[in-house]
Image (spheres, rainbow, N blue to C red):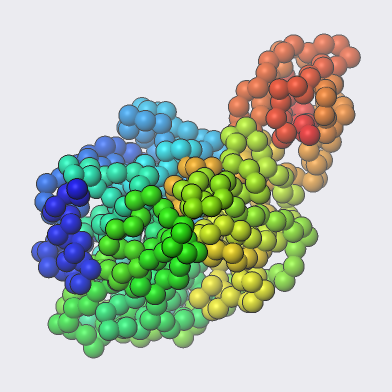
Amino acid sequence: MKWKRFQTLVLAAACTCGAAAQTVLIPPALDASQPVTLTLQAGEHSFDGGPATMTLGANGPVLGPTLIVHRGDFADWTVVNALDDSTTLHWHGMHVAAHHDGGPYTPIAPGATWNPEFTVLDPAGTFWYHPHLHHMTEHQVSMGVAGQIWVRDPVEQALPLPRSYGVDEFPIVLQTKDFDAMGMVLAGTNADDVPMANATVGGTLPVPASVVRLHLLNGASQRVFQLGFTGDLPFHLIATDGGLLPAPVERTRLRLAPGERAEILLDCAALEGTTFDLRSFASELPSATYGAAQPGMGPGQVLTGYAGNPLNGNDFCFMTLAVGPAAPDAVFSLPAALDPAHVVPWSTGDVTRGFTFSPSAMGPGALNSPFLINGAPFDMEVVNFEVLLGAVEVWQLTNNSPIGHPFHVHNTPFYLLDRNGVAPGPEEAGLKDVVFVPAMQSVRIVMQFNDFADPVMPYMYHCHMLVHEDGGMMGSFVVVDPAAGVAGAATADERARAVPNPATEAVLLRGLDGPVRVWGAGGVLVLETTAERGGTRVTCAGLRTGIYVAVDASGRSVRFAVE
Ligand SMILES: [Cu+2]
């Protein structure tokens, strides 16, 4: 049995929001141009105004502050892990070096502090932070750790856009969660039947009778949202994951898959005194989408716990907007153009890679089985491929599975080239870092890897349905610098060499002295030995395919590949 209190609210939410007197929680904003400390901590939070339940958050019991930063700022952000478990914190969508990216290879032990440092290179946009520890991501996000990052830049600042935090510009984290009979958040289930905005169930958001700017994030573990407003109120999409669109796109619906963001403008100037709801029109979602009546291609494909969840295939409400008076200095007009630079600059790439999604089991259990990318589950000890620094790459994403997957790439945003060979609509023509690939369809994306060559520390690509990601629908890649020699043909010190390179059975490391340590993907120490005159022989038996770096006591290094 579900917790009765939540069940009542869900039923209320299915028809109208705002019955409860709760105001939608607005996380505090932090000026992240200054040093910022994010302390990940346990706490208690009431999602629906009733008794509190155990949660996790950053600098508070749930969610985390909105970090506001400018392009070109140095991000001096410190993460303190005050949780009982290890964690990581990933700057989702931001273009940072792999060591500072917060992926699964940079865990933060309980009680430890992590000091990423990077310059903000991204254009104005809505990014977010969330844990990314392998097998624990879904649990820690569901328990509440998530926050938005807003990047500002001169292009954005020259536009007449609302930017009064919590007054006419709002972070909106949309999630659905599952609660047990005691009101505890349950992770990893398919019974997420409580919708919420900013960890508030059935809340009201006071907005002014002027132009209102919402930074929408789908922070749900699995569910795809078909967003819209009561009465099909039109809105203007101005930015997607990686930044501003070339021009506003007027819509009454917006599909937002897990991990995706959208900035929208709502013209509320003539709506003073009215209320309307932000809803997911889930009845419009096609089958084979998590959130539709059928999660698979047909009624024979079932997902444990999914049937009976009232949100599936039914329209529901996240929050009610209540329009009050406008401030005198409010924004009353919509911009005609945004950032003309954000159009796809490439029609082809130097390299094309294929990524095929498939279930690990066929038949009626397919949807419950782990999903694979190119036939393999994620392996922490394998780097799946290398990208050459500077390369423009086309990634062909082919979904041969009976459910749609939102595919996310770390390191750099991408553009969509096409969906099933057809150019994307204007709402997907800008910079993205998550793309929804419907069942049995294909998408091509294109991007350039311009910075941050590092043969050891990988970047991730994965499904952003967190249950799929934790289940192994993920892979990793490293960016290597051709000028430094592909896969270690040259080294930082010309006296050091690896022969043969790449190696299959054994490799001879020349030019190293004294104790030698060999590091694998993610900075994992794989062996220690002592250099010998004439070369140090390392057998490849027991070494996975991938890139390794051997470093001697004086810091001289040699890079080699094992095939
Ligand atoms: Cu998936």
Residue appearing at x 65%, y 46% in the figure: 375
Query: Is 547 placed left or right of 505 in the picture?
Result: left
The image shows residue 299, relative to residue 384, as above or below, that is below
The image shows residue 534, relative to residue 337, as above or below, that is above
**Farthest bottom residue in view:** 270
Residue appearing at x 47%, y 33% in the figure: 107
The image shows residue 496, relative to residue 341, as above or below, that is above
Residue 489 versus residue 153: which sits nearer the camera? 489
> Residue 471 location, x and y as percent?
49, 42
Note whether residue 97 is visible: no
Query: Is 144 placed left or right of 522 in the picture?
Result: left
Residue 272 versus residue 86: which sits nearer the camera? 86
Residue appearing at x 83%, y 24% in the figure: 505
Q: Looking at the rendering, in which quadrant would you find the C terminus?
A: top right
Query: Is 445 placed left or right of 175 in the picture?
Result: right
The part of the image, by quadrant, that contains residue 309 is bottom left
The part of the image, by quadrant, that contains residue 83 is top left
> Residue 175 location, x and y as percent?
33, 57
Note whether residue 201 is visible: yes
> Residue 256 location, x and y as percent?
43, 66
